[in-house]
Image (cartoon, rainbow, N blue to C red):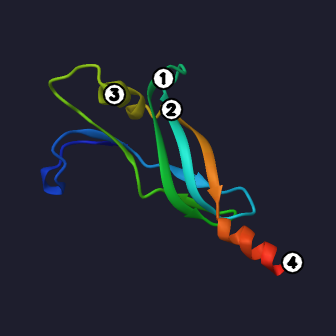
Amino acid sequence: MCQNKDYQRQVFNSRVELVPTFKNTSKKTVVAIAHTLTVTDAFGDKIVDGESKLDLKIPPGKTVESESFYLWEDNQFIQVEPYDKLTGPVSTESPRPRSILRRSFNPMARRKASRDQ
């Protein structure tokens, strides 16, 4: 999402925000996610990438929006920075974020299941 300067909302530079959502397709509760995010343009060329680890509880079959997000601000003094590379694809709705995930399940669920047997 592109967001222009908005002094009333205390946005002092134009910026691009990306708020990831994650879906748990397993039958276990996810309690943490480590992911590598790559955003490419319509031609598949990499614009930006990054790594993150999130403590995020996702029940089985549910989708959640992360409270953490990526933010790239415009720096008027530097050209060809990530913000500059993202604004075109974002304005045409063509950026392609891709995330490679590692997830951690609730270890307490395993302990409880083994005690119940």
Query: Picture coordinates of residue 90 (x, y %)?
Result: 40, 34
SS at mark 3 in the image: helix
Does residue 71 sit above or below 43 in this rendering? below
Residue lying at 71% horizontally and 63% vertically, measured from the top left: 28
- First in sequence, mark 3 or 4: give its number: 3
Q: Front-most of 13 and 35?
A: 35
- First in sequence, mark 2 or 4: give its number: 2
- First in sequence, mark 3 or 2: give its number: 2
Cα distance between the residues tagged 2 and 1 = 7 Å
Residue lying at 50% horizontally and 32% vertically, measured from the top left: 38
Instruction: Tell me the kind of residue under disc 4.
Output: Gln
| Disc marking residue 82 | 3
Report which residue position mark 1 lands on. 46
**From the viewer's perspective, is 73 left or right of 93?**
left
Report which residue position mark 2 lands on. 38
Instruction: Tell me the kind of residue under disc 3.
Output: Pro
Cα distance between the residues tagged 1 and 4 = 49 Å
Cα distance between the residues tagged 3 and 4 = 53 Å
Instruction: Tell me the kind of residue under disc 1.
Output: Lys
